Amino acid sequence: MTKKTGGWLESIKTVVYAGLIAVGIRTVAFEPFNIPSGSMIPTLLVGDYLFVSKYAYGYSRHSMPFSPELFQGRIFGSMPARGDVAVFKFPRDNSTDYIKRIVGLPGDRIQMRGGKLFLNGQEVPREGLGPYTVEGDGPRMTVRRYRETLPASAGAAPVRHEILEASDDGHYDNTAEFVVPPGHVFAMGDNRDNSLDSREMNAVGFVPVENLVGRAEMIFFSVDGSAAWWEVWAWPFAVRWDRLFSGVR
């Protein structure tokens, strides 16, 4: 009887230790996230699962589960590079996870004119890549795809990435000039006409650096949603095999 009890205690201790290790890794190293919406198409697709590095920008209370108010600011903090794809807590509630591309750093001036991004008064170059058909995020539609080149930030190289534009005269294609305040960044989705982001000051607005959770690093799994959970025979055909273990840029 004593031996049996000891066996149960050892099993419980093992589960507790495993849980603590998992929480520790999630807090200081990597955390998995999934993509539920199309605001970052074509970089990230609905159904992508990715790892986010928690150490990339240092640690804030949002690095921990449930964002406990143990301290303010960041420990070992560093600013993101312009062009990073980052997860952050929605500034309005400090609990909902958003993922966008960082296009503006403190002091930057950001404006959209005719669908084109202007940074500190200079147009950010974009190169036409032809049509792109958006699927898996509402009605199927064809839009225009571009390759945009964001200028380098301190200690980093220029970032070339793809964006989508349904038109150049949409709601967020002509804006006032935004000046990013100290301690904040400006975030935008790559699916420019289908993204609620920093261009909407009454929703996302400027993102406090403290709200940054981490930098998107790698897609480890991806499904296109064509197979229901019970359609086991269809699972292999729903996996986007070409996206597995690809880096996020």
Image (spheres, rainbow, N blue to C red):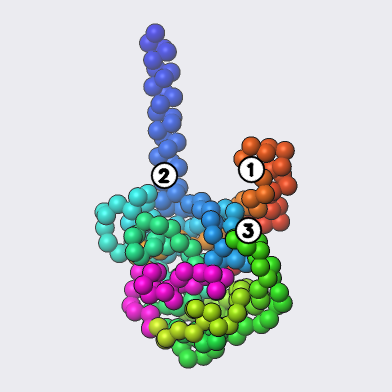
- Between circles 2 and 3, the one closer to the viewer is 3
Q: Name the foreground residue: 119 vs 71.
A: 119
Is residue 26 something that shows in the picture?
yes
Q: Is residue 191 magenta?
A: yes
Q: Where is residue 86 drawn, in percent x and y?
A: 48, 65
User: Which of the marked residues, 1 or 3, is nearer the chain's N terminus?
Assistant: 3
Figure quadrant of residue 190: bottom right
Q: Give the residue type that dot 1 points to.
A: Ala
Q: Where is residue 96 drawn, in percent x and y?
A: 40, 57
User: For mark 3, does the 10 Å Cα neighbourhood hold few (<14), some (14 to 19), or many (20 or more) residues?
Assistant: some
Q: Where is residue 70 drawn, in percent x and y?
A: 26, 54
- Report the residue that reaches farthest toward the bottom: 121
Which quadrant would the N terminus be assigned to in this image? top left
SS at mark 1? loop
Quick check: marks 1 and 3 in contact, CB under 8 Å?
no
Q: Where is residue 172 drawn, in percent x and y?
A: 49, 78
- Report the residue that reaches farthest toward the front: 139
Distance Cα–Cα, label 1 vs label 3: 14 Å
Dominant SS of magenta comes to loop
- Marking on residue 23: 2
SS at mark 3? loop
On the image, numbered disc 3 is attached to which residue? 136
User: Which of the marked residues, 2 or 1, is nearer the chain's N terminus?
Assistant: 2
Query: Is 233 on the left or on the right of 199, as rendered?
Result: right
